[in-house]
Image: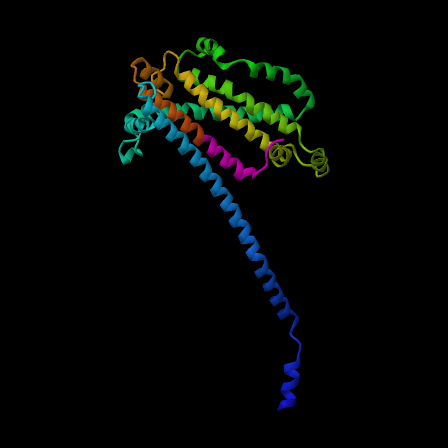
Amino acid sequence: MSGRTGPTADKPPRADTAQKKTGTAGTGSASPTLIASRTARVGSRARGALLRWLVLALAVGVWQLAARAHGSVYFPPPGRIARHAYDLWFSGPVSHLFLTDAAVDNILPSLGRMAVGFALAAVAGVALGIAVGRSRRAYALCNPVLQFARAVPPPALVPVFVVVLDFGTQMQIASIVFSAVWPVLINTADGARNVDPLRLEVATVLRLTAFERLWLLLLPSALPRIFAGLRLSLSLSLILMVFSELLPGTANGIGFTLTDAQSRSDLLTVWAALVLLGALGHLLNTGLLAVEKRLIGSKRPT
């Protein structure tokens, strides 16, 4: 009886059992390190976000105290501005997403014009930038024209747009597109020119078609530059949206609200519109940065 159990007790463990134990131990030792690294990253992001909000709250608090101490009608405290903006634009019914009639009549048309202008500028800029950037000769020939057109201030061309398109939505969208297309076009062309030559050689060896080169090589390589141009284009679109609505013949929009409030000496509405524009710019830029991070991660153009 003891002779049968002895060899069994002294039998060495199986190799797969030892591997499982080793793998479990290795996983257990690596897991706390991974968790600690992720916790550190989350903590760093939380501290950064908290610091940014703290600076903003401090700036608003200083503004509130200074405005109350000064008591000037031209510089109301941010608390009054926020209440006025809420009553003017965001106190509507739930069925309208809390938007009032004033918000529907002015904010939404402005955002619609800006969205159309920005989308047209982005599509045209990327398409033309890829076409120009693929050829060094085409880039050398077109670059002086691009730099000249980019240097022309868009407001200076408003009389031309008015003559060609007359006052109205078409002229406003055209002014936005003309201003916003150049950063996307030039950055896209630079990105397409700076594709790694080794990748181009590999594409030649693999006999990729023109569409495959565009989709698998040129666009991914130029994507960081494209987003750099899109961020500039987005800011210019917001600026030109407001400027185009300051012109005669405009019947709605945030810019129209500014001029109308100024003519009526409604300073609270003027300040509310300015704060609204700043908030819209921040939200739009944050959304674009989120899309950029989703597509290309932390890469940035050099």
Residue 229 place in picture, x, y as percent: 55, 26
Question: The N terminus is located in which quarter?
Answer: bottom right
Residue 301 place in picture, x, y as percent: 61, 31
Q: Is 57 one of the magenta-colored residues? A: no
Do we see residue 104 in this rendering? no
Question: The C terminus is located in which quarter?
Answer: top right
Q: Identify the main secondary structure in magenta.
A: helix
Of 20 and 178, nearer the camera is: 20
Please report the bounds of the magenta region as a residue range. Answer: 284-302
Do we see residue 226 in this rendering? yes
Q: In which quarter of the image is residue 268?
A: top left
Residue 104 place in picture, x, y as percent: 32, 26
Q: Does residue 221 appear to the left or right of 168 in the view shown?
A: right
Of 96 and 208, nearer the camera is: 96
Q: Does residue 223 appear to the left or right of 247 in the view shown?
A: right
Q: In which quarter of the image is residue 273?
A: top left
- Residue at coordinates 66% horizontally, 17% vertically from top-left? 141
Q: Quadrant of residue 14?
A: bottom right
